[in-house]
Image (cartoon, rainbow, N blue to C red):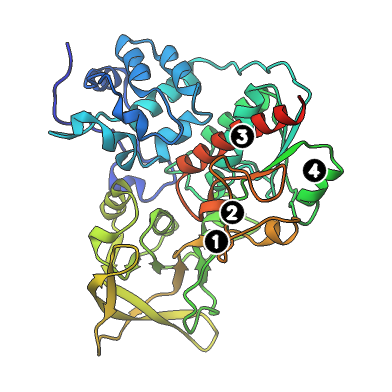
Amino acid sequence: MPNMSLKKNEMPSQAPDVRNKNFDEVALGYTEEMALDEAKRCLHCKNKPCVSGCPVGIHIPDFIAKVAEGDFEGAYKIITESSSLPAVCGRVCPQETQCESKCVRGIKGEPVAIGRLERFVADYHNKHFKGMPEKVKSNSHRVAIVGSGPAGLACAGDLAKRGYEVTIYEALHTAGGVLVYGIPEFRLPKDIVRREIDSLKALGVKIETNAVVGKAVSVDELLDDFGYEAVFVGSGAGLPRFMNIPGEHFKGVYSANEFLTRVNLMKAYKEDSDTPIRRGKRVAVVGGGNVAMDAARCALRLGADEVSIIYRRGESELPARHEEIEHAKEEGIVFRLLTNPVEIIGDEQGFVKAIKCVRMTLGEPDASGRRRPVEEKGSEHLIDVDTVIISIGTSPNPLIKSTTTGLETEKWGGIIVNEGGATSREGVFAGGDAVTGAATVILAMGAGKTAAESIDKYIKSKNK
């Protein structure tokens, strides 16, 4: 019998006053019984609108049907036909604005919990099946990939399944890109990322770490000297932006990139860390996106007495996922909305001691369609803080474009590509944040899959 409940099965999670003191995963995942019950809410629509909302085109009703039958491994096989990172996507994808936003059940109630079911299926597989996929017979064609984030991993996985010999060049000492340095352990456990990467290695993908393309080797050299027939650039957008206000040089001011990289990748919160981080007691995080929520929640877990999100628009304009905002509120994060920093104040020793802000009101919509924040005259006020984390966005590192011949980019640094991911330089393809600027994991994966198909066509056309 179908389950006609208007509500999703709730996701079990750690209690807020427990989880805000540890880095263990917040969401605990569905039980088998919950997954079976939730899967029966799917109506299996003939036109499958949910699939159109998935950037990688997962056959959603088909995998959910398998879950409803109790064939969890069959569901996993359907998901992995389209996605190389199901356990990751089930955790960090904004399903509420993608596949679930198209779900017919969402018209009169809550949509089917597609993301939670994807996570359940991936976790069930990882728990019960320890084997790895078999390597496909090589077609003797070689492709290099710059960056081991979601775009690069998705591109590598699709090419490896086609028989290509793929090598990923990663600048850091650990593969995974934003999945390991940007997203905290309590949202995405690193063991899960490592297993997904191990699956790609089993397919034959090679990963070279500590390899900065543009310094150690250039894209031109990969094509001209190393024998690769194509290169995919998925180097992300890791160059942080600052507000350019007075006081950003004081000790205790971090970009969210640096803060999260130290916490997530370098484990700076450990007492014996080689790269310790300041444990602020009163922390201000400037910004309202998912990265800002991650930074704020990490700061709280490091022992801060108060952590504030400072955002110049209202709550309805916060760009972070609703789930992340609610989790942050439950954990005790303070939201100082319609507030904008204008100066960071330091003490005589050069450490942060306060942040000067002004209050804002929302005026007419700007070019993005959001109402433009306008400063209230005479509203300056100080907030006592000892740490400030700036999380107002990132842009692509200029290293790739400055060292690659004939590569056209936007003024702000994004690589210009056509619909298939091809750049202005023959044999070079790109996708993900290096093209669009900071976006979601699943959109980057979609771009990687698109580029893999284009690379396959390109190399085949060159070898007719």
Sequence order check, earlier mark of 2 and 3: 2
**Between discs 3 and 1, the one toward the N terminus:** 1
When asked about the image quadrant of residue 146, the answer is top right
Q: Disc 1 or disc 2, which is closer to the eye?
A: 2
Q: Quadrant of the C terminus?
A: top right
Q: In this view of the protein, can residue 15 be seen by the observer?
A: yes
Name the amino acid type tagged 4: Leu
The mark nearer the N terminus, 4 or 2, is: 4
Q: Crowding near pointer 3: few (<14 within 10 Å), some, many (20+)?
A: some
Residue drawn at x 42%, y 41% as measured from the top left: 92
Q: CA distance from mark 4 to mark 2?
A: 19 Å
Q: Is residue 452 left or right of residue 316?
A: right
Q: Which residue is found at the position 34% from the left and 10% from the top? A: 70
Q: Nearer the viewer, residue 261 or 244?
A: 244
Q: Residue at x 41, y 16 (%)?
A: 75
* Coordinates of residue 281 in the picture (x, y in percent): 41, 68
Label disc, if present, on residue 416 of the rendered structure: 2
Residue at 58% across / 49% down in the picture?
Answer: 417
Instruction: Name the foreground residue: 173 vs 321.
Output: 321
Residue at which label 4 appears: 223
* Amino acid type for the residue under numbered disc 3: Ser
Distance of mark 1 from mark 4, alpha carbons? 26 Å
The answer to whether marks 1 and 2 mark residues whose Cβ atoms lie closer than 8 Å is: no
Q: Secondary structure at mark 2?
A: loop
Residue located beneath label 3 in the image = 454
Residue with the mark numbered 1 = 395
Classify mark 4: residues with Cα within 10 Å, few (<14), some (14-19) or many (20+). Answer: some
Indicate the quadrant where residue 49 lies: top left
**Disc 2 to disc 3, how far (Cα)?**
15 Å
